Image: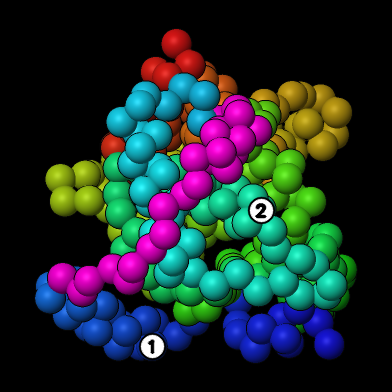
Amino acid sequence: MTLRERIGVVKMGSDPAILNGMGIWERLKNRLGAKSPAFAPVPEELWLRILLQHRIFSGLVDVDKALLRDLSARFLATKKFLPVGGASASQELMLAVATQACLPLLGLDLRWYRDFTTIYLTPQAYTVTQTVEAKGGIIHEYEDEFAGEAFALGPVALSIPDIHASGRGDGYNVVIHEMAHKLDGLDGAYDGCPPLHQGMDGCAWTKEFSLAFEDFRKNAARAGRRKGRVSIDVYGAEGPDEFFAICCEYFWEMPRVLLKEYPGVYEQLALFFRRDPAAWQR
């Protein structure tokens, strides 16, 4: 039985009617101000160890560190970690996921992760059979290796080795990548544009991301033919949704790289996340 079969959900792209129906209930709960469940604070020794192990937290000011610690404790109280395939979940591993998942929420809140409660932990990256339709209606199948996955109206899956490889400030972060997909899909469409805040210019977002994505695709293609170079993971060329998720990784892991390559995209993400991580590195 595959991981997807064990989880029993479909991947991104669920029926918008289902999303809209849930949206009514979510708006009602938010309006009523539903109380958060009781949560245990993060132990001091464990907290300090997590901060030291993950370079991406080194630039945080004390106020944001305190906020991140509180968000992480609430995250752990509201999410369920389920190891599969012989994996195990230590307290330190779960906190590593929580802190990295909550880093993008420093300027937001936990309601942005309201559409899932379960996080599956796999002992390694897993293989998924992908299907694509070529010209003439010919169907091709191929095997793809996933380090993580975000399911529509359902859980998140994360590979434990990839969790350990995240947060080192090198541009790779499977936790932030999959959480970015969750943010992106809150409006029912996985298109590289999450629900924007009031006052943000949707046209500006679309313009900056569209121009950057087209440029990035061309650069990635040249790099594939060994005629060019890209500073950002070429997986972002898979589609607007993956480009958004990859940009979120770099925004928090290597913000100055993203700022240099695509300043317009960086500016839009800074407006959305209400933080400027490049300033921390300065």
52 within the magenta span: yes
**Relative to residue 63, is residue 282 depicted above or below?**
above
Question: What residue lies at 22% left-to-right and 51% top-to-bottom?
Answer: 197
Alpha carbon of mark 1 to alpha carbon of mark 2: how far?
33 Å
**Relative to residue 57, is residue 278 depicted above or below?**
above
Whether residue 243 is visible to the viewer of this picture, yes or no, is no
Estimate how packed mark 2 is, as few (under 14), some (14 to 19) or many (20 or more) residues with alpha carbons within 10 Å: some
Mark whose residue sits in front, 1 or 2: 2
Looking at the rendered structure, the secondary structure element under dot 1 is helix
Tell me, for residue 18, which label it has, or none.
Answer: 1
Question: What residue lies at 69% left-to-right and 50% top-to-bottom?
Answer: 163
Q: Which residues are magenta?
A: 33-56
Question: What residue lies at 63% left-to-right and 43% top-to-bottom?
Answer: 173
Question: What residue lies at 56% left-to-right and 22% top-to-bottom?
Answer: 257
Q: Which comes before the other along the chain, label 1 or label 2? A: 1
**Is residue 21 left or right of 191 when viewed as pictured?**
left
Q: Name the image quarter holding the N terminus.
A: bottom right
Frontmost residue, 231 versus 86: 86
**Is residue 92 left or right of 38 when viewed as pictured?**
right
The x and y percentages for residue 258 are 52, 27
Whether residue 133 is visible to the viewer of this picture, yes or no, is yes
Instruction: Inspect the image, locate mark 1, and give the three-letter code of the amino acid beneath it.
Output: Ile
Q: Which residue was labeled with disc 2? A: 93
Tell me, for residue 154, which label it has, or none.
Answer: none
